[in-house]
Image: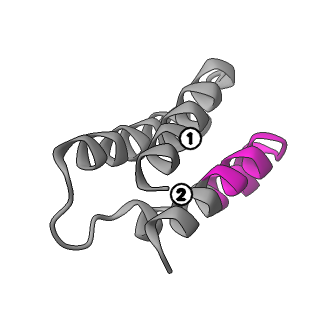
Amino acid sequence: MTETEKAAKVIEALRAAEREPAGVALSILNGLTGLVRAEGEQPLQVAETRSSVFLAICEIGKALHRGQPAGKLWRTAIEAAERWKSLVT
C-alpha cells in the first residue's frame, strides 16, 4: 500500500469512526496504528506530519476511553491526516 493510500484510508476511517459510539470508534482507531507507522526513511516534514496524525489519534482514544468529549479532536486528526496525504501525493 502506498503512502497516499495509507493516508486516504486513515482519513476515511477517522470520518467513519467519528460517527460511531465510543466503543466502535475505539476499535476503528486501534486498527489505524499500523497505517500511521513509518516505514523506512522519509522527509522530515512527512515524518512530523505522520507523527501528528498518530498523536491526534491517541488523544481521541484517550478522550473516548475516559468518556470525555472528542469533538474538536476529530477535526484535528482529520486535518493532520489530510496534510499527510497532501505531502505524499
The correct choice, above or below, for 9 with respect to 21 in the image is: below
| Distance in Å between CA atoms under marks 1 and 2 | 7 Å
Give the class, few, some or many, for how many residues have Cα within 10 Å of label 2's Cα (few <14, many ≥20). Answer: many
Given the image, on which type of amino acid does mark 2 rest? Ala
Which sits earlier in the primary sequence, circle 1 or circle 2? 2
Image disc number at residue 65: none
The correct choice, above or below, for 55 with respect to 38 in the image is: above
Q: Main secondary structure of the magenta part?
A: helix
Q: Secondary structure at mark 1?
A: helix
* Residue at 63 percent of width and 26 percent of height: 75
* Residue at 37 percent of width and 39 percent of height: 55
The correct choice, above or below, for 45 with respect to 25 in the image is: above
Nearer to me, 70 or 3: 3
Image disc number at residue 82: 1
Measuring from the top left, give residue 58's x and y in whole percent: 43, 42
* Colour pattern of the rendering: one colour
Q: Residue furthest bottom?
A: 1
Nearer to me, 67 or 20: 20
* Residue at 69 percent of width and 22 percent of height: 71
Determine whether, in the image, residue 84 is placed left or right of residue 82: left
Determine whether, in the image, residue 85 is placed left or right of residue 13: left
Give the class, few, some or many, for how many residues have Cα within 10 Å of label 1's Cα (few <14, many ≥20). Answer: some
Q: Secondary structure at mark 2?
A: helix
* Residue at 67 percent of width and 48 percent of height: 14
Given the image, on which type of amino acid does mark 1 rest? Glu
Q: Are marks 1 and 2 in contact (CB under 8 Å)?
A: yes
Residue ID for mark 2: 7
Q: Is residue 18 magenta?
A: yes
The correct choice, above or below, for 57 with respect to 79 in the image is: below
Q: Is residue 30 magenta?
A: no
Q: Give, as a single range, the part of the protein colored magenta.
A: 11-28
